[in-house]
Image (tube, grey):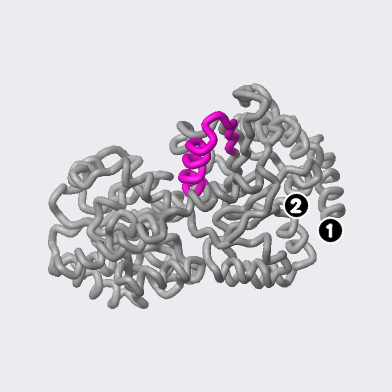
Amino acid sequence: MSLLYNTLSAVLLLLLLPFLPFILGKKKYRRRIGRRLGWGLAGQLPPLASESSPTFWIHALSVGEVTSALPLARGLREAFPAARIVFSAATRSGGEVATKLLSPHVDALIAAPLDLGPVVPFFARTIRPDLFILVETDFWPHWLHCLKRRQVPTLLVNGRISERSFVRYQRFSGFFRPMFRSFSLLSMQTGADAAKMVALGVEERRVLTLGNLKFDTSQVADQQISPGDHGLNKERYGFSAHAPLWICGSTHRGEEELIFRVHRRLLTTLPDLQLLIAPRNIERAGEIVALGATHQCACRRWTDGKTAGPVLILDTIGELAGCYPMAEAVFVGGSLVPQGGHNPIEPAAAGVPVLFGPHMEDFAEIAQQLIECGGARRIDAADTLAEELLGLLTNPVAHDLAAAAASACVRANRGVVGRHIDAVNALLAGTQPGP
Protein backbone atom coordinates (compact mmCIF):
# COMPACT_ATOMS: atom_id res chain seq x y z
CA MET A 1 0.00 0.00 0.00
CA SER A 2 2.86 2.38 0.85
CA LEU A 3 4.59 1.66 -2.47
CA LEU A 4 1.34 2.28 -4.35
CA TYR A 5 0.75 5.58 -2.51
CA ASN A 6 4.32 6.74 -3.11
CA THR A 7 4.02 5.92 -6.81
CA LEU A 8 0.72 7.78 -7.08
CA SER A 9 2.15 10.83 -5.30
CA ALA A 10 5.05 10.95 -7.77
CA VAL A 11 2.66 10.63 -10.71
CA LEU A 12 0.44 13.37 -9.28
CA LEU A 13 3.43 15.70 -9.01
CA LEU A 14 4.28 15.10 -12.67
CA LEU A 15 0.68 15.82 -13.64
CA LEU A 16 0.74 19.07 -11.67
CA LEU A 17 3.99 20.36 -13.16
CA PRO A 18 2.35 21.86 -16.32
CA PHE A 19 -0.05 23.83 -14.08
CA LEU A 20 2.64 25.07 -11.69
CA PRO A 21 3.37 28.31 -13.62
CA PHE A 22 -0.33 29.23 -13.50
CA ILE A 23 -0.54 28.49 -9.75
CA LEU A 24 2.60 30.47 -9.01
CA GLY A 25 1.31 33.29 -11.18
CA LYS A 26 -1.39 33.99 -8.62
CA LYS A 27 -0.13 36.16 -5.77
CA LYS A 28 -2.45 34.36 -3.34
CA TYR A 29 -0.60 31.05 -3.83
CA ARG A 30 2.86 32.04 -5.05
CA ARG A 31 4.77 32.32 -1.81
CA ARG A 32 3.11 29.51 0.14
CA ILE A 33 3.15 26.92 -2.65
CA GLY A 34 6.77 27.71 -3.36
CA ARG A 35 7.65 27.25 0.30
CA ARG A 36 5.68 23.97 0.43
CA LEU A 37 7.75 22.73 -2.50
CA GLY A 38 10.94 23.56 -0.57
CA TRP A 39 12.06 26.79 -2.25
CA GLY A 40 14.29 28.73 0.12
CA LEU A 41 14.12 26.04 2.81
CA ALA A 42 17.87 25.86 3.47
CA GLY A 43 18.01 29.61 4.04
CA GLN A 44 15.36 29.37 6.75
CA LEU A 45 17.36 26.93 8.88
CA PRO A 46 19.97 28.25 11.31
CA PRO A 47 23.22 26.30 11.71
CA LEU A 48 23.51 23.74 14.48
CA ALA A 49 25.08 24.96 17.71
CA SER A 50 27.33 21.90 17.58
CA GLU A 51 27.51 18.58 15.77
CA SER A 52 26.12 16.85 18.85
CA SER A 53 23.05 19.12 19.06
CA PRO A 54 19.83 17.35 18.07
CA THR A 55 17.39 18.68 15.49
CA PHE A 56 13.69 18.31 16.26
CA TRP A 57 11.12 18.67 13.51
CA ILE A 58 7.64 19.31 14.94
CA HIS A 59 4.64 19.34 12.61
CA ALA A 60 1.07 20.50 13.28
CA LEU A 61 -1.93 20.68 10.99
CA SER A 62 -3.69 23.93 11.96
CA VAL A 63 -4.62 26.26 14.80
CA GLY A 64 -5.76 23.71 17.38
CA GLU A 65 -2.73 21.48 16.89
CA VAL A 66 -0.34 24.45 16.95
CA THR A 67 -1.82 25.50 20.30
CA SER A 68 -1.35 21.96 21.62
CA ALA A 69 2.30 22.05 20.52
CA LEU A 70 3.12 25.21 22.49
CA PRO A 71 3.96 23.59 25.87
CA LEU A 72 5.94 20.82 24.15
CA ALA A 73 8.02 23.29 22.12
CA ARG A 74 8.62 25.28 25.29
CA GLY A 75 9.59 22.13 27.20
CA LEU A 76 11.96 20.96 24.46
CA ARG A 77 13.68 24.33 24.44
CA GLU A 78 14.20 24.18 28.19
CA ALA A 79 15.37 20.54 28.15
CA PHE A 80 17.57 20.91 25.03
CA PRO A 81 18.76 24.55 24.95
CA ALA A 82 21.30 23.87 22.16
CA ALA A 83 18.85 21.93 19.97
CA ARG A 84 17.61 23.17 16.61
CA ILE A 85 13.82 23.12 16.64
CA VAL A 86 12.05 23.35 13.28
CA PHE A 87 8.29 23.78 13.27
CA SER A 88 6.00 23.29 10.27
CA ALA A 89 2.29 24.00 9.93
CA ALA A 90 0.06 22.79 7.12
CA THR A 91 -2.44 25.65 6.94
CA ARG A 92 -1.99 29.37 6.54
CA SER A 93 -3.93 30.07 9.75
CA GLY A 94 -1.83 27.50 11.60
CA GLY A 95 1.32 29.22 10.39
CA GLU A 96 0.04 32.60 11.57
CA VAL A 97 -0.72 31.29 15.05
CA ALA A 98 2.64 29.49 15.16
CA THR A 99 4.40 32.78 14.38
CA LYS A 100 2.52 34.43 17.23
CA LEU A 101 2.91 31.69 19.86
CA LEU A 102 5.99 29.66 19.03
CA SER A 103 8.57 32.14 17.72
CA PRO A 104 10.31 32.51 21.12
CA HIS A 105 10.75 28.74 21.45
CA VAL A 106 11.69 27.44 17.98
CA ASP A 107 14.49 28.25 15.55
CA ALA A 108 12.58 28.05 12.27
CA LEU A 109 8.93 28.26 11.26
CA ILE A 110 8.39 26.68 7.86
CA ALA A 111 5.49 25.67 5.63
CA ALA A 112 4.72 21.95 5.60
CA PRO A 113 5.94 20.03 2.55
CA LEU A 114 3.46 18.75 0.01
CA ASP A 115 3.36 14.96 0.26
CA LEU A 116 4.37 14.53 -3.37
CA GLY A 117 7.23 12.70 -5.11
CA PRO A 118 10.67 14.11 -4.19
CA VAL A 119 9.34 17.02 -2.10
CA VAL A 120 9.31 15.30 1.29
CA PRO A 121 12.69 13.57 0.75
CA PHE A 122 14.15 17.00 -0.06
CA PHE A 123 12.77 18.44 3.20
CA ALA A 124 14.11 15.47 5.17
CA ARG A 125 17.59 15.76 3.62
CA THR A 126 17.68 19.50 4.23
CA ILE A 127 16.36 19.52 7.81
CA ARG A 128 18.14 16.28 8.84
CA PRO A 129 15.95 15.70 11.91
CA ASP A 130 17.04 13.49 14.77
CA LEU A 131 13.39 13.17 15.80
CA PHE A 132 10.13 13.95 13.99
CA ILE A 133 7.15 14.87 16.19
CA LEU A 134 3.63 14.91 14.76
CA VAL A 135 0.98 16.71 16.81
CA GLU A 136 -2.40 14.93 16.95
CA THR A 137 -3.14 14.31 13.27
CA ASP A 138 -2.24 15.08 9.60
CA PHE A 139 -1.00 11.63 8.64
CA TRP A 140 0.78 11.37 5.27
CA PRO A 141 2.02 7.90 4.24
CA HIS A 142 4.80 9.06 1.89
CA TRP A 143 6.11 11.50 4.50
CA LEU A 144 6.22 8.87 7.25
CA HIS A 145 7.68 6.25 4.90
CA CYS A 146 10.45 8.64 3.88
CA LEU A 147 11.39 9.34 7.51
CA LYS A 148 11.38 5.64 8.35
CA ARG A 149 13.62 4.92 5.36
CA ARG A 150 16.07 7.50 6.67
CA GLN A 151 15.85 5.84 10.14
CA VAL A 152 14.46 8.97 11.77
CA PRO A 153 12.49 8.15 14.95
CA THR A 154 8.90 9.37 14.73
CA LEU A 155 6.67 10.33 17.65
CA LEU A 156 2.94 11.05 17.61
CA VAL A 157 1.93 13.33 20.49
CA ASN A 158 -1.54 14.20 21.79
CA GLY A 159 -2.96 11.34 19.75
CA ARG A 160 -6.69 10.82 19.86
CA ILE A 161 -9.16 8.70 17.92
CA SER A 162 -12.82 9.64 17.80
CA GLU A 163 -15.42 6.94 17.28
CA ARG A 164 -16.00 8.16 13.73
CA SER A 165 -12.29 8.02 12.92
CA PHE A 166 -11.97 4.59 14.56
CA VAL A 167 -14.66 3.17 12.28
CA ARG A 168 -12.94 4.69 9.24
CA TYR A 169 -9.52 3.39 10.28
CA GLN A 170 -10.93 -0.10 10.74
CA ARG A 171 -12.72 -0.01 7.39
CA PHE A 172 -9.53 0.97 5.57
CA SER A 173 -7.11 -0.85 7.83
CA GLY A 174 -4.96 -1.92 4.90
CA PHE A 175 -4.09 1.74 4.40
CA PHE A 176 -3.98 3.05 7.98
CA ARG A 177 -2.42 0.13 9.89
CA PRO A 178 0.99 0.28 8.14
CA MET A 179 1.03 4.06 8.61
CA PHE A 180 0.39 3.86 12.36
CA ARG A 181 2.88 1.00 12.72
CA SER A 182 5.57 3.15 11.13
CA PHE A 183 5.70 5.38 14.23
CA SER A 184 8.42 4.66 16.75
CA LEU A 185 6.04 5.70 19.51
CA LEU A 186 2.43 6.85 19.71
CA SER A 187 1.57 9.00 22.73
CA MET A 188 -2.20 9.05 23.20
CA GLN A 189 -4.30 11.45 25.27
CA THR A 190 -6.39 8.84 27.11
CA GLY A 191 -6.46 5.15 27.87
CA ALA A 192 -9.42 4.75 25.53
CA ASP A 193 -7.42 6.32 22.68
CA ALA A 194 -4.51 3.98 23.39
CA ALA A 195 -6.79 0.94 23.42
CA LYS A 196 -8.19 1.90 20.00
CA MET A 197 -4.70 2.22 18.57
CA VAL A 198 -3.78 -1.24 19.84
CA ALA A 199 -7.04 -2.61 18.43
CA LEU A 200 -5.99 -1.23 15.04
CA GLY A 201 -2.96 -3.50 15.11
CA VAL A 202 -0.19 -1.38 16.62
CA GLU A 203 2.13 -3.20 19.04
CA GLU A 204 1.18 -2.40 22.63
CA ARG A 205 4.78 -1.54 23.56
CA ARG A 206 4.71 1.33 21.05
CA VAL A 207 1.60 2.95 22.52
CA LEU A 208 1.68 5.05 25.68
CA THR A 209 -0.93 7.17 27.46
CA LEU A 210 0.91 10.37 28.36
CA GLY A 211 -2.06 12.75 28.57
CA ASN A 212 -3.26 15.86 26.78
CA LEU A 213 -0.62 18.55 26.22
CA LYS A 214 -3.30 21.21 26.52
CA PHE A 215 -3.35 20.60 30.27
CA ASP A 216 0.14 22.14 30.26
CA THR A 217 -0.81 24.80 27.71
CA SER A 218 -2.91 26.25 30.48
CA GLN A 219 0.19 26.50 32.68
CA VAL A 220 1.78 28.80 30.11
CA ALA A 221 -1.39 30.91 30.15
CA ASP A 222 -1.25 31.16 33.95
CA GLN A 223 2.07 32.97 33.65
CA GLN A 224 0.69 35.46 31.12
CA ILE A 225 -2.62 36.53 32.69
CA SER A 226 -3.11 37.70 36.27
CA PRO A 227 -6.56 37.96 37.92
CA GLY A 228 -6.22 41.75 38.14
CA ASP A 229 -6.09 41.96 34.35
CA HIS A 230 -9.58 40.53 33.79
CA GLY A 231 -11.48 43.81 34.09
CA LEU A 232 -8.96 45.58 31.87
CA ASN A 233 -9.21 42.74 29.37
CA LYS A 234 -13.00 43.15 29.24
CA GLU A 235 -12.58 46.83 28.50
CA ARG A 236 -10.03 46.07 25.80
CA TYR A 237 -12.68 44.01 24.03
CA GLY A 238 -15.28 46.75 24.39
CA PHE A 239 -17.18 45.26 27.33
CA SER A 240 -18.08 46.77 30.67
CA ALA A 241 -15.46 45.77 33.24
CA HIS A 242 -18.06 45.05 35.93
CA ALA A 243 -21.01 43.46 34.07
CA PRO A 244 -21.14 39.64 33.79
CA LEU A 245 -19.96 38.00 30.55
CA TRP A 246 -20.54 34.55 29.13
CA ILE A 247 -18.48 33.20 26.24
CA CYS A 248 -19.52 30.67 23.62
CA GLY A 249 -16.38 29.22 22.08
CA SER A 250 -15.96 27.37 18.76
CA THR A 251 -19.65 27.42 17.89
CA HIS A 252 -21.16 25.74 14.83
CA ARG A 253 -24.17 26.50 12.66
CA GLY A 254 -27.32 25.55 14.56
CA GLU A 255 -25.91 26.58 17.95
CA GLU A 256 -25.93 30.37 17.60
CA GLU A 257 -29.72 30.37 17.15
CA LEU A 258 -30.05 28.69 20.58
CA ILE A 259 -27.43 30.97 22.11
CA PHE A 260 -29.26 34.14 21.07
CA ARG A 261 -32.55 32.74 22.39
CA VAL A 262 -30.93 31.96 25.73
CA HIS A 263 -29.26 35.35 25.89
CA ARG A 264 -32.52 37.21 25.29
CA ARG A 265 -34.19 35.14 27.99
CA LEU A 266 -31.41 35.84 30.51
CA LEU A 267 -31.54 39.58 29.88
CA THR A 268 -34.92 39.71 31.63
CA THR A 269 -33.15 38.75 34.88
CA LEU A 270 -29.64 40.07 34.15
CA PRO A 271 -30.15 43.19 32.01
CA ASP A 272 -26.42 44.00 31.88
CA LEU A 273 -25.36 40.50 30.76
CA GLN A 274 -22.72 40.48 28.01
CA LEU A 275 -22.00 37.83 25.38
CA LEU A 276 -19.00 36.87 23.25
CA ILE A 277 -19.44 34.33 20.44
CA ALA A 278 -16.36 32.87 18.76
CA PRO A 279 -17.49 30.78 15.76
CA ARG A 280 -15.33 27.82 14.79
CA ASN A 281 -15.37 29.13 11.23
CA ILE A 282 -14.70 32.86 11.37
CA GLU A 283 -16.01 33.28 7.80
CA ARG A 284 -19.49 32.82 9.31
CA ALA A 285 -19.22 36.04 11.35
CA GLY A 286 -21.46 38.06 9.02
CA GLU A 287 -24.09 35.34 9.06
CA ILE A 288 -24.07 35.36 12.87
CA VAL A 289 -24.38 39.14 13.04
CA ALA A 290 -27.47 38.92 10.80
CA LEU A 291 -28.89 36.11 12.94
CA GLY A 292 -28.37 38.21 16.07
CA ALA A 293 -30.36 41.05 14.52
CA THR A 294 -33.38 38.74 14.14
CA HIS A 295 -33.20 38.19 17.92
CA GLN A 296 -32.86 41.90 18.71
CA CYS A 297 -29.19 41.39 19.60
CA ALA A 298 -27.04 44.11 18.04
CA CYS A 299 -23.72 42.38 17.40
CA ARG A 300 -20.38 43.97 16.68
CA ARG A 301 -17.44 42.24 14.98
CA TRP A 302 -13.99 42.43 16.54
CA THR A 303 -12.37 43.05 13.15
CA ASP A 304 -14.54 46.14 12.61
CA GLY A 305 -12.62 48.04 15.27
CA LYS A 306 -12.58 48.44 19.00
CA THR A 307 -16.16 49.64 19.42
CA ALA A 308 -18.08 49.00 22.61
CA GLY A 309 -21.23 46.94 23.03
CA PRO A 310 -22.65 44.01 25.01
CA VAL A 311 -22.50 41.39 22.19
CA LEU A 312 -19.24 40.67 20.35
CA ILE A 313 -18.49 38.25 17.52
CA LEU A 314 -14.81 37.29 17.80
CA ASP A 315 -13.86 36.83 14.15
CA THR A 316 -10.11 36.40 14.55
CA ILE A 317 -7.91 33.33 15.03
CA GLY A 318 -5.83 32.59 18.12
CA GLU A 319 -7.48 35.00 20.62
CA LEU A 320 -10.22 32.86 22.16
CA ALA A 321 -8.10 31.21 24.87
CA GLY A 322 -6.96 34.61 26.08
CA CYS A 323 -10.59 35.72 26.42
CA TYR A 324 -11.74 32.85 28.64
CA PRO A 325 -10.37 34.22 31.95
CA MET A 326 -12.60 37.31 31.71
CA ALA A 327 -15.80 35.24 31.51
CA GLU A 328 -18.16 34.22 34.29
CA ALA A 329 -19.18 31.08 32.36
CA VAL A 330 -18.21 29.38 29.11
CA PHE A 331 -20.21 27.25 26.70
CA VAL A 332 -18.07 24.92 24.54
CA GLY A 333 -19.41 24.70 21.01
CA GLY A 334 -19.73 21.79 18.63
CA SER A 335 -21.59 19.99 21.40
CA LEU A 336 -25.25 20.92 20.95
CA VAL A 337 -24.96 19.77 17.33
CA PRO A 338 -23.29 16.45 16.42
CA GLN A 339 -19.77 17.77 15.80
CA GLY A 340 -17.92 15.87 18.55
CA GLY A 341 -17.39 18.94 20.71
CA HIS A 342 -14.25 21.00 21.29
CA ASN A 343 -11.62 20.95 23.98
CA PRO A 344 -12.93 22.15 27.38
CA ILE A 345 -9.49 22.36 29.00
CA GLU A 346 -8.76 26.00 28.15
CA PRO A 347 -11.85 27.48 29.83
CA ALA A 348 -11.47 25.10 32.78
CA ALA A 349 -7.84 26.13 33.21
CA ALA A 350 -8.94 29.75 33.26
CA GLY A 351 -10.96 28.96 36.38
CA VAL A 352 -14.33 29.36 34.67
CA PRO A 353 -17.36 27.04 35.01
CA VAL A 354 -17.81 25.06 31.77
CA LEU A 355 -21.03 24.07 29.99
CA PHE A 356 -21.38 21.81 26.97
CA GLY A 357 -24.01 19.80 25.15
CA PRO A 358 -24.38 16.02 24.75
CA HIS A 359 -22.04 15.71 21.76
CA MET A 360 -18.60 15.69 23.39
CA GLU A 361 -17.50 12.41 21.80
CA ASP A 362 -14.07 13.72 20.78
CA PHE A 363 -13.29 14.72 24.37
CA ALA A 364 -15.40 12.21 26.25
CA GLU A 365 -12.96 11.33 29.04
CA ILE A 366 -11.93 14.92 29.73
CA ALA A 367 -15.56 16.07 29.70
CA GLN A 368 -16.53 13.31 32.12
CA GLN A 369 -13.66 14.21 34.46
CA LEU A 370 -14.82 17.80 34.59
CA ILE A 371 -18.43 16.78 35.23
CA GLU A 372 -17.46 14.38 38.03
CA CYS A 373 -15.33 16.98 39.83
CA GLY A 374 -18.07 19.61 39.54
CA GLY A 375 -16.24 21.93 37.14
CA ALA A 376 -18.55 21.34 34.16
CA ARG A 377 -22.19 20.65 33.45
CA ARG A 378 -23.75 18.87 30.51
CA ILE A 379 -26.87 20.43 29.04
CA ASP A 380 -29.18 18.98 26.39
CA ALA A 381 -31.27 21.93 25.19
CA ALA A 382 -31.62 25.70 25.22
CA ASP A 383 -33.89 25.61 28.29
CA THR A 384 -31.34 23.65 30.29
CA LEU A 385 -28.56 25.98 29.16
CA ALA A 386 -30.53 29.00 30.34
CA GLU A 387 -31.28 27.39 33.72
CA GLU A 388 -27.67 26.36 34.36
CA LEU A 389 -26.33 29.75 33.32
CA LEU A 390 -28.80 31.59 35.47
CA GLY A 391 -27.82 29.46 38.46
CA LEU A 392 -24.12 30.16 37.94
CA LEU A 393 -24.56 33.88 37.29
CA THR A 394 -26.90 34.57 40.23
CA ASN A 395 -25.41 32.26 42.86
CA PRO A 396 -21.84 33.32 43.72
CA VAL A 397 -21.22 30.28 45.91
CA ALA A 398 -22.23 27.80 43.20
CA HIS A 399 -20.19 29.75 40.63
CA ASP A 400 -17.05 29.85 42.75
CA LEU A 401 -17.27 26.16 43.64
CA ALA A 402 -17.59 25.18 39.98
CA ALA A 403 -14.76 27.53 38.96
CA ALA A 404 -12.43 26.14 41.63
CA ALA A 405 -13.30 22.55 40.69
CA ALA A 406 -12.58 23.18 36.99
CA SER A 407 -9.23 24.77 37.78
CA ALA A 408 -8.30 22.00 40.24
CA CYS A 409 -9.10 19.32 37.65
CA VAL A 410 -6.65 20.89 35.20
CA ARG A 411 -3.91 21.30 37.81
CA ALA A 412 -4.28 17.64 38.81
CA ASN A 413 -3.63 16.56 35.22
CA ARG A 414 -0.55 18.69 34.59
CA GLY A 415 2.95 17.28 34.07
CA VAL A 416 2.23 16.02 30.56
CA VAL A 417 5.22 17.80 29.03
CA GLY A 418 7.62 16.20 31.49
CA ARG A 419 6.40 12.73 30.51
CA HIS A 420 6.88 13.61 26.85
CA ILE A 421 10.43 14.87 27.47
CA ASP A 422 11.24 11.50 29.08
CA ALA A 423 9.92 9.76 25.95
CA VAL A 424 11.97 12.06 23.70
CA ASN A 425 15.15 11.28 25.65
CA ALA A 426 14.49 7.56 25.29
CA LEU A 427 13.90 7.82 21.54
CA LEU A 428 17.09 9.86 21.05
CA ALA A 429 18.99 7.22 23.01
CA GLY A 430 17.51 4.47 20.84
CA THR A 431 15.60 2.84 23.69
CA GLN A 432 11.91 2.13 24.06
CA PRO A 433 10.12 4.50 26.49
CA GLY A 434 8.22 2.85 29.27
CA PRO A 435 4.83 3.67 30.78
- Please state if 182 lies on the left or on the right of 242 as rendered: right
- One can see residue 290 in this view: no
Observer-nearest residue: 424 or 302?
424
- Please state if 84 lies on the left or on the right of 104 as rendered: right
Magenta region: 66-87
Which secondary structure type mostly characterizes the magenta part of the structure? Answer: helix
Residues packed near mark 2 inside 10 Å, few (<14), some (14 to 19) or many (20 plus): many
Residue 94's label in the rendered image is none
**Considering the numbered disc 2 on the image, is that residue within a helix, a strand or a loop?**
helix
Q: Specify which label sits upstream in the sequence, 2 or 1.
A: 1
**Three-letter code for the amino acid on which mark 1 is drawn:** Met
As drawn, 37 above or below 233? above
Q: Quadrant of the C terminus?
A: bottom right
Rendering quarter of residue 386: bottom left
Rendering quarter of residue 377: bottom left
| x and y, in percent, of residue 211 in the image | 50, 59
Residues packed near mark 1 inside 10 Å, few (<14), some (14 to 19) or many (20 plus): few
**Three-letter code for the amino acid on which mark 2 is drawn:** Pro
Q: Quadrant of the N terminus?
A: bottom right
Residue at horizontal 58 percent and vertical 53 percent from the top: 157
Which residue has dot 2 on it? 141
| x and y, in percent, of residue 340 in the image | 50, 67
- Please state if 352 lies on the left or on the right of 191 as rendered: left
Residue at horizontal 45 percent and vertical 31 percent from the top: 104
Residue at horizontal 54 percent and vertical 50 percent from the top: 420
**Considering the numbered disc 1 on the image, is that residue within a helix, a strand or a loop?**
loop
| x and y, in percent, of residue 49 in the image | 60, 23
- One can see residue 202 in this view: yes
- Please state if 23 lies on the left or on the right of 193 as rendered: right
CB-based contact (under 8 Å), mark 2 and mark 1 = yes
Which residue has dot 1 on it? 1
In reply to whether residue 201 is colored magenta, the answer given is no
